[in-house]
Image (spheres, rainbow, N blue to C red):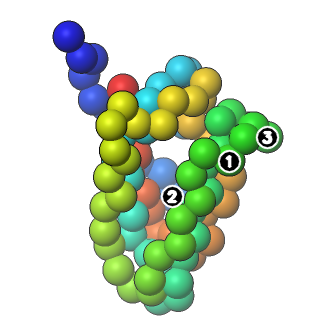
Amino acid sequence: MSSDVKSKRITATGSLSVGPARIRQIHILTSSSAGRLTITDGSGGETVLDIDTQQSTSGSINVPSDGIKVGDIHVSAATNITAATIFYN
């Protein structure tokens, strides 16, 4: 049995404060400049996802298999990211 997927929307850097989780998908909306989103395993932890995006776009990043396991989801960089919704369980 799998657990329910939840989501949180962010508009700035910081912790999502969800505790241990598996990142399943991310939906990103960028500003008029190319963007970059970096996620770490907790504040100051290992970088687990670092992606670049095109300018003025929205799109989803699907994480394969069981997702990315982290102790807590921490967005350490959200350059030119207007908003991001992170799906996790």
57 relative to 64, above or below: below
Kindly check if marks 3 and 1 are in contact, taking CB atoms under 8 A apart as contact. Answer: no
Q: Tag 3, which secondary structure?
A: loop
Between marks 3 and 1 in the image, the one whose residue lies nearer the viewer = 1
Q: How many marks overall?
A: 3
What kind of residue is marked 3? Gly
Q: Earlier in the sequence, mark 2 or mark 3?
A: 2
The disc at residue 38 is none
Q: Choose top left, top right, bottom left or bottom right for residue 84.
A: bottom left
Between marks 2 and 1 in the image, the one whose residue lies nearer the viewer = 1
Kindly check if marks 2 and 3 are in contact, taking CB atoms under 8 A apart as contact. Answer: no
Q: Residue at x 47, y 26 (%)?
A: 21
What kind of residue is marked 1? Thr
Could you tell whether 88 is left or right of 51 in the image?
Answer: left
In the displayed orientation, state which residue is furthest to the left. 1
Mark 1, residue position: 47
